[in-house]
């Protein structure tokens, strides 16, 4: 029985959604559980191991533009397939670290390879494919799957550590990533690709692109807002368990609350899919920021109680889930599909280059002042992101604007 073509056109997004669960689970969320335990055995402080992770994230930002350019030129099939092989081998090798030097080298390798397999490259890869599914819809589907990464991998990694220790846990995670991600990337990204200058499908929304000085201004303020809203992302993923424990909860309860974030990311993304044809990406991004800030307000005021902690996790999860979609669809709406992969790469370069310091900075705040103040600092970052967001020009209000400034 033949599968209808429209259904087949969803397979790349579904396949990449599955690999994003594995990718973020192993290359991001596992650190929150394993790095503090590794620090104890290796004789390192919490700020040292998360400082090493910050350098790894910074290195990932350096290679992100290269990953985007490779996808624009060659498509995502080989970029993501080879990236998943290298990332998986780096995870396996983390089981053999004996000190800060080997930990530093392997985290750099893992995070560098991660830039070839995580969201931005996945978004650019499906945007290149000649599918009847709009790129915006494929991005929403990918993130819908990816939202459960924390739900699966925080408790799973903790269970594996309690049963086998951190060395065997890294081996299990690395082999699982190799067996799941590599074949999926190889097979679902096959097929004809869309030319960069191809006209929009007739079903695409009528979203005008910015030109001239407005285009450059939008890029500046969008990236600055992304930096502020993303600065806390690495800190939440890596310090959630530690900070929540500092509020008076057990490690198991902190992991449980963290696991709530994932399903509510999916809830937020499912809601976005329902309204995406009617909601312009600027509004999607605004909604995400408002929900995330509401989550931190609940965390700071009610987080000492279990209901308050779960409410905070739910609100933050919904906002963060929607923000991931906006991170892919907003540049596409403002600037178009030409050079989309490279553009996402440069955005990641700036964002990760700055945001890489977040795990170290917030780990230091946690050590010096406590988890509540660490969460308060994250809330302030969101306030700054909202303030800068208001400066991004809306192209629907400037359809005829143009200028001599070069495009970015």
Image (cartoon, helix red, strand yellow):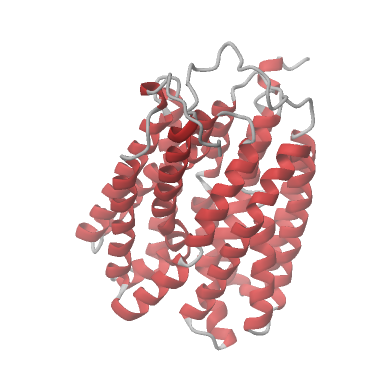
Q: Which image quarter: residue 104?
A: bottom right
Q: Give the residue at the far left of this rendering.
A: 301
| Residue 153 in the figure: left or right of residue 14 | left
How far from the left and from the top, in percent, is residue 103?
65, 76
How far from the left and from the top, in percent, is residue 243?
36, 68
Q: Quadrant of the N terminus?
A: top right
How far from the left and from the top, in percent, is residue 7?
66, 20
Residue 312 seen in the current view: no
Residue drawn 73% across and 39% down? 76
Q: Nearer the viewer, residue 150 or 199?
A: 199
Using the image, determine if residue 204 lies above or below residue 367: above
| Residue 97 in the figure: left or right of residue 300 | right
Q: Which image quarter: residue 393?
A: top left
Q: Give the residue at the far bottom of this rendering.
A: 43
| Residue 296 in the figure: left or right of residue 108 | left
Q: Nearer the viewer, residue 319 or 105?
A: 105
Q: Quadrant of the C terminus?
A: top right
Residue 153 seen in the current view: yes
Residue drawn 64% across and 52% down? 64
How far from the left and from the top, in percent, is residue 3?
73, 17
Using the image, determine if residue 342 lies above or below residue 403: below
Q: How many marks?
A: 0
Q: Give the residue at the far top of this rendering.
A: 202
Residue drawn 60% across and 71% down? 163
Q: Which image quarter: residue 138?
A: top right
Residue drawn 68% across and 36% down? 125
Q: Nearer the viewer, residue 386 or 28?
A: 386
């Amino acid at each position: 029985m033949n599968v209808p073509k429209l259904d087949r056109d969803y397979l790349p997004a579904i396949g990449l959604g599955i690999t994003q669960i594995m990718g973020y689970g192993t290359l991001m969320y596992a650190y929150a559980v394993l790095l503090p335990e590794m620090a104890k055995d290796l004789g390192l402080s919490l700020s040292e191991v998360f400082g090493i992770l910050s350098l790894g994230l910074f290195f990932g930002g350096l290679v992100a533009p290269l990953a985007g350019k490779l996808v624009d030129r060659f498509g995502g099939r080989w970029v993501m397939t080879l990236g998943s092989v290298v990332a998986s081998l780096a995870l396996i090798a983390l089981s053999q670290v004996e000190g800060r030097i080997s930990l530093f080298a392997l985290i750099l390798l893992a995070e560098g390879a991660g830039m070839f397999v995580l969201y931005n490259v996945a978004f650019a890869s499906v945007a290149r494919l000649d599918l009847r599914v709009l790129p915006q819809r494929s991005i929403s589907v990918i993130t819908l799957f990816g939202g459960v990464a924390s739900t699966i991998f925080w408790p799973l990694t903790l269970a594996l550590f309690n049963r086998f220790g951190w060395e065997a846990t890294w081996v299990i995670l690395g082999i699982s990533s190799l067996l799941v991600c590599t074949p999926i990337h190889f097979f679902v990204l096959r097929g004809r690709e869309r030319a960069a200058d191809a006209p929009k499908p007739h079903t695409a929304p009528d979203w005008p692109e910015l030109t001239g000085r407005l285009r450059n201004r939008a890029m500046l303020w969008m990236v600055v807002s992304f930096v502020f809203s993303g600065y806390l992302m690495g800190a939440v993923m890596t310090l959630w368990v530690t900070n929540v424990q500092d509020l008076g909860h057990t490690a198991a309860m902190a992991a449980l609350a963290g696991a709530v974030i994932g399903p509510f990311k999916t809830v937020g993304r499912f809601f976005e899919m329902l309204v995406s044809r009617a909601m312009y990406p600027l509004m999607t991004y605004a909604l995400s920021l408002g929900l995330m800030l509401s989550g931190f307000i609940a965390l700071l005021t009610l987080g000492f109680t279990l209901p308050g902690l779960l409410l905070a996790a739910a609100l933050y999860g919904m906002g963060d889930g929607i923000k991931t979609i906006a991170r892919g669809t907003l540049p596409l709406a403002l600037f178009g599909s030409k050079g989309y992969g490279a553009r996402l790469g440069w955005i990641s370069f700036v964002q990760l280059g700055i945001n890489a310091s977040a795990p170290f900075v917030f780990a230091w705040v946690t050590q010096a002042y406590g988890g509540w103040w660490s969460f308060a600092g994250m809330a302030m970052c969101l306030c700054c992101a909202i303030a800068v967001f208001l400066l991004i020009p809306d192209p629907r209000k400037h359809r005829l604007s143009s200028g001599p400034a070069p495009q970015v």
